[in-house]
Image (cartoon, grey):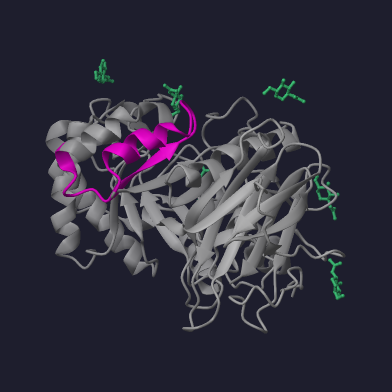
Amino acid sequence: MHTICVLSILGAFSRLVAGQEIAEIWQTLEDQSKLFAPLNLSQPATFSAAKASATADITVDETTAYQTVLGFGASLTDSAAQSLSQLKSKNAAAYSELLQKLFDPTFDASSAGITYLRVPLGASDFSNRSYSYDDTPGDTQLSKFNIAAAPSYVFEVLNDIQTINHELRVHVLPWSPPGWMKSSKTMNGGNFTSDMAETYAKYLLKALQGFDSEHVQVYAISIQNEVLNSNPTYPSCKMTYQDEGAIGTALRPLMNNNGFSAVKLIGYEHNWSGYKYPISLMKSYGDVFDGVSFHCYGGTVDDQDKFYQAYPNKDIHFTECTGMDGAAWWGDLSWQAENIFIGAIEHHAQNALVWNLISGEELPSSTSCGKDKKRNSCRAVVTANANGTYVLNEEYYNIAQAARAVIPRDVGGPFGKLIRSTVAPGNRTSNLHVNAFATGRAKAGDPTRYSLHVLNMAETGTYTIAFQGKQASYSFPKGLSTIGFYA
Ligand SMILES: *[C@@H]1O[C@H](CO)[C@@H](O)[C@H](O)[C@H]1NC(C)=O
Ligand SMILES: *[C@@H]1O[C@H](CO)[C@@H](O)[C@H](O)[C@H]1NC(C)=O
Ligand SMILES: *[C@@H]1O[C@H](CO)[C@@H](O)[C@H](O)[C@H]1NC(C)=O
Ligand SMILES: *[C@@H]1O[C@H](CO)[C@@H](O)[C@H](O)[C@H]1NC(C)=O
Ligand SMILES: *[C@@H]1O[C@H](CO)[C@@H](O)[C@H](O)[C@H]1NC(C)=O
Ligand SMILES: *[C@@H]1O[C@H](CO)[C@@H](O)[C@H](O)[C@H]1NC(C)=O
């Protein structure tokens, strides 16, 4: 593995335990000369006594801790599952290799370490047709509910992923209720019909039971993707916060009484700019909702703070943003790093996800991302080629660099917690974006792992890092660096 000695430990630094003088560095550079590459340093960064007058560029304060981060990931849409399933039939070795590269959660694995996966309940804009689990109009008893309306490759692939990753959290949600529960009578756009709240809650319970019957353990369920989005070309549904609240109020006791009391109930799932909706939802229905999710398609990441300030004890998820095919590699990588993989976490999210996990040659049923019928123009974490090969995109390296900072250090150990870090003001440091984390250990007495997830948008520069009264200098290249040390 790629653990190397980069912090030479001075005797004076007595809080570091002998034998734990290890640090890790992974880098993804603007010029793509390093892509999630482990690094050997010829000149180790050394934490030593700070000069009395010295002001550090980056200050880490582990005495102030924030949320535990559950990890990074993407959505396993029907078309993503189909691409993976096709890769499995074309090239089983490449499929296994790719699942390892995406999902192996062990600390020493050279993997993106995805631990959070969002999965649509029924059709999304990345399905080969529009369907729900019960498309029989007026079936309020849900006697025709059928989890197998989903293509079988969805559960096949999910089960394969779960075999590799026991840390995986699965977050399920529909893109639309069945058409007959809506005024539009179709899944593609329209409004939820308020008097269907109880029926729809039962439908969502049946979806949880259906996933259970397919051996998929669910961590969280949202009532509706993008509650403010009605688009007649793909599954989507407008839902008022009162309707979402009424469905949640009916669903929570059904979940509690049917073995799903540990499953989190999440609301909103839409743009940063619409933060007033989740605030209203919590104000009236905070006793049934555990948290809310944000997307990037309107507003700015600091809108998450407005929800946090109103409801600091509720969970915040960041669950969707997509890059587009053909965009500039570094422009997209650095924007997503700043605003999502660093930004969303800095602004209180427990996770950060992009949209599709993988896209292939097959056609989704919509052109929600653009006119390219082939891939619908939304760039996924991975692009699958028709010949059984694949390409890892910007999103892969962003997820890998971010996950490396929070992934459990030990099997069964905790995930990293965000801790306070500050970057000194000034135009020398204004291109530097930093999150710091502390990761506890499985065995009492083992030193805590500290990590920095750094985006440097300027040319290579040497910066000082202050930690526990000591300072180290490190030359951060233009790109992403994730560094780890122990104390
Ligand atoms: C790092 O150093 C070790 C031991 O010196 C060597 O085996 C390994 O190949 C090096 N890795 C890189 C990425 O240079
Ligand atoms: C969608 O995929 C399923 C499963 O592979 C297949 O049976 C069905 O024919 C496909 N539908 C369309 C419209 O392509
Ligand atoms: C949905 O509700 C809005 C009001 O919130 C209304 O303007 C619109 O016409 C409705 N759409 C449909 C398809 O019923
Ligand atoms: C929010 O997201 C949707 C996608 O669902 C987008 O079409 C819309 O323009 C965005 N709205 C705002 C207010 O930014
Ligand atoms: C597979 O397809 C991709 C994309 O068309 C191409 O770039 C690559 O060279 C092909 N690889 C092989 C081994 O045929
Ligand atoms: C740095 O900021 C100062 C003012 O704060 C400004 O005068 C100076 O031109 C800036 N330097 C660069 C290189 O941008």
Q: Is residue 296 magenta?
A: yes
* Percent coordinates x, y for residue 216 in the rendering: 40, 66
Quarter of the picture containing the N terminus is: bottom right
Nearer to me, 84 or 453 = 453
Nearer to me, 402 or 460 = 460
Q: Residue at x 57, y 69 (%)?
A: 449
Q: Residue at x 22, y 40 (%)?
A: 282
Check the image and name the residue furthest to the front.
52
Q: Is residue 430 left or right of residue 247?
A: right
Q: In the displayed structure, would residue 127 be above or below residue 112?
A: above
Q: In the displayed structure, would residue 487 be above or below residue 220?
A: below
Q: Is residue 102 magenta?
A: no
Q: Is residue 81 left or right of residue 202?
A: right
Q: Residue at x 50, y 76 (%)?
A: 441
Nearer to me, 471 or 22 = 471
Q: Residue at x 17, y 42 (%)?
A: 285
Nearer to me, 467 or 324 = 467
| Image-quadrant location for residue 215 | bottom left
Q: In the displayed structure, would residue 273 be above or below residue 33?
A: above
* Percent coordinates x, y for residue 59 in the rendering: 59, 51
| Image-quadrant location for residue 136 | top left
Q: Is residue 58 left or right of residue 44?
A: left
* Percent coordinates x, y for residue 190 in the rendering: 30, 25
| Image-quadrant location for residue 19 | bottom right
Question: In what quadrant does ligand 4 lie?
Answer: top left
Is residue 158 visible in the rendered image? The answer is: yes
Q: What segment carries the magenta color?
A: 284-312
* Percent coordinates x, y for residue 157 in the rendering: 53, 62
Q: Is residue 429 left or right of residue 314?
A: right
